[in-house]
Image (cartoon, grey):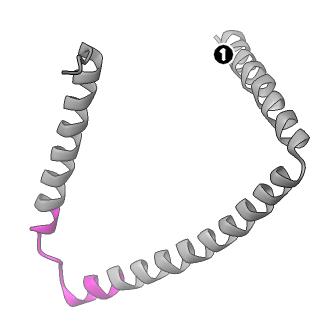
Amino acid sequence: MVQASASVIIALLMGITGVAFVIWQIRRILAYEQGSEVMQNIAAAIQEGASAFLTREYRVLAIFVAIVATVLATFPALANCIVFCCRIFCVSGGWLSGDVYRSSC
């Protein structure tokens, strides 16, 4: 049998607890009345607008990801440079964030 550390077991239990909580909340919210006809029309309009927005956003994002993936696949040296730059930016950003925090106190 595979031995699991305490942290893995705790993480698993917390995940299961989170899923159970979400299911409980969904059932509780869906049990409420949907409101008057006017409220339902407003909700439908909001849902339609949100759906249109997300469709457009995902289309733009898919094009962007395709372009970036093509560039990185075509120029592997550029990918190595980006990884190196990301490391530098993460470290310097964290350092500067801490520096800004210390100077504002």
* Residue in the picture at 19% in, 39% down: 16
Q: Position of residue 31 (x, y in %)?
A: 9, 68
| Left or right of residue 42: residue 24 | left
Left or right of residue 42: residue 85 = right
Where residue 53 appears, as percent x and y from the top left, is 56, 75
- Point out the image quarter for the C terminus: top right
Q: Residue 77: percent from the left, percent from the top? A: 90, 39
Q: Residues within 10 Å of mark 1 (few under 14, many from 20)?
A: few
Q: Which amino acid does label 1 sit on?
A: Tyr
* Drawn side of residue 7 relative to residue 51, left or right: left
Q: Quadrant of residue 3?
A: top left
Judge whether 76 appears above or below 11 on screen: below
Q: Mark 1 points at which residue?
A: 101
Nearest to the observer: residue 48 or residue 104: 48
- Measured as percent of width and height from the top left, residue 9 is found at 22, 23
Does the magenta portion include 89?
no
Q: In the image shown, does 86 or 46 lie closer to the viewer? A: 86
Residue 32 covered by magenta stretch: yes
Residue 78, by quadrant, is top right
- Of residues 13 and 42, the one nearer the viewer is 13
Q: Is residue 66 above or below residue 23?
A: below
Residue at x-position 23% and y-position 21%: 2
Question: Residue at the location (72% across, 17% down)?
Answer: 100
User: From which residue to which does the magenta span run?
Assistant: 29-42
Query: Left or right of 8: which side holds 56?
Result: right
**Element on which disc 1 rests:** helix
